Image (cartoon, helix red, strand yellow):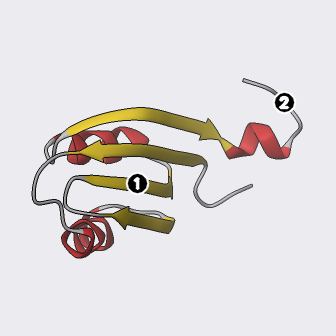
Amino acid sequence: MLEFRYDTQLLIEGNNLDEDVITEYFTKHLEGDCLLAVGDEELIKIHFHTNEPWKVLEYCSTLGEIYDIVVEDMDRQARGLHG
């Protein structure tokens, strides 16, 4: 079984976004791994493995508009299941 089950990906569109601030928040407040937070001041791509994807969405929504949200169950994928 995987330690962190959900592959959570999204885009954040906003103003004065900062990759370093976002990375620091994730590191201090969210449990998970494989964090990727890349972009510029107006658009950031997030990729994160966690057991609590709703916390990722909740935090990111405070930074700007979130869209292209994908939450995939990697445990189901590992077992060859769809959906």
Q: Where is residue 74 drawn, in percent x and y?
A: 69, 45
Q: Which label number is shown at residue 45?
A: 1
Q: Is residue 30 above or below residue 62?
A: below
Under tag 1, what secondary structure? strand
Residue 58 is drawn in which quadrant?
A: top left
Query: Residue 11's mark?
Result: none
- State the residue position of label 2: 81
Q: Is residue 79 left or right of residue 71?
A: right
In the displayed structure, 69 sits above or below 20; it is: above
Q: From mark 1 to mark 2, how far is it between C-alphas?
A: 27 Å
Amino acid of disc 1: Lys
Looking at the rendered image, the quarter that the N terminus falls into is bottom right
Residue 35 image point, x, y percent: 46, 67
- Residue at 36 percent across and 32 percent down: it is 67
Q: Position of residue 6 (x, y in %)?
A: 57, 46
Please name whichever residue, 10 or 81, is drawn nearer the observer in this view of the structure: 10
Q: Nearer the viewer, mark 1 or mark 2?
A: 1
- The kind of residue tagged 2 is Leu
Q: Write down the quadrant of residue 28 in the picture.
A: bottom left
Determine whether, in the image, residue 22 is placed left or right of residue 50: left
- Across and down, in percent, residue 3 comes to 62, 61
Q: Which numbered disc flags the more N-terminal residue, 1 or 2?
A: 1
